[in-house]
Image (spheres, grey):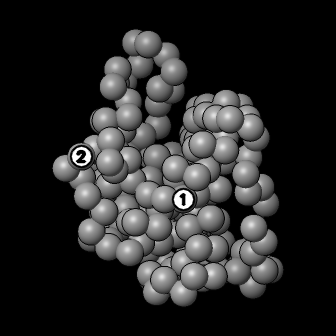
Amino acid sequence: MRLTKKERSEIRKHLRGLNLTEEAQLMKRFIQHGRISTYEHVLSVTRLSFYLNRRLHLGASDSELVRGAFLHDFYLYDWHISDSHERLHGFHHPSVALKNAMRLYTLSPVEQNIIQSHMWPLTLFSLPKCRAAVIVCLADKICSTYETLVRSNPFPC
């Protein structure tokens, strides 16, 4: 997957105000899959989501797609520690991420749906209700599988 310079610049523009906050930087401290930090993971999901939307002409809003993808795992704890925030991380972290994101940022309904539904079908009743949410849900599964099996970042800068 190759994004053009212009596309990478567009992603940075849409992330402005999100990725440099103290809270967003905390994601660099937590491991997501293998050796990949949560921050690296959400950037990979963001890049792949943007790429799929553009290359397949899916028509989702770039801004909402990028913001929702970046915030989809904004839960801000180490889920590998047994006494950490939630024991059933896969089921609960979308709600925690959404609550954290809404506390700090103004989110559109599309961005909220992206965050809340990205673990579907595991979270059976949190359905992706828009194109952007379906794209991020798929991109998250692709990136997570790669990170877990290959133990490296599928879409580095």
- Quadrant in the picture for residue 28: top right
Front-most of residues 85 and 127: 127
Residue plotted at (47% across, 67% down): 135
Whichever of labels 1 and 2 marks the residue nearer the N terminus, that label is 2
- Taking 85 as reference, is 71 above or below it? below
The quarter of the rendered structure image containing the C terminus is: bottom right
Q: Horizontal and vertical percent for residue 8?
A: 72, 75
Residue found at the very far top of the displayed protein: 83
Tell me: 45 left or right of 74. right
- Taking 112 as reference, is 57 above or below it? below
How far, Cα to Cα, is label 1 from label 2?
18 Å
Marks 1 and 2 close (CB-CB < 8 Å): no
Disc 2 residue type (three-letter): Leu
Disc 1 residue type (three-letter): Ala
Residue plotted at (34% across, 20% down): 87
Q: Horizontal and vertical percent for residue 93?
A: 36, 38
Q: Assign a secondary structure to mark 1.
A: helix
- Taking 12 as reference, is 25 above or below it? above
Tell me: 105 left or right of 13. left
From the image, tell me which residue sits under label 1. 139
The quarter of the rendered structure image containing the N terminus is: bottom right
Q: Assign a secondary structure to mark 2.
A: loop
The local crowd at label 2, few if under 14, some if 14 to 19, many if 20 or more residues have their Cα within 10 Å, is few
Q: Horizontal and vertical percent for residue 39?
A: 61, 46
The local crowd at label 1, few if under 14, some if 14 to 19, many if 20 or more residues have their Cα within 10 Å, is many
Q: Horizontal and vertical percent for residue 15?
A: 57, 68
> Which labelled disc corresponds to residue 43?
none
Residue plotted at (24% across, 46% down): 124
Residue found at the very far left of the displayed protein: 125
Front-most of residues 88 and 56: 56
From the image, tell me which residue sits under label 2. 124
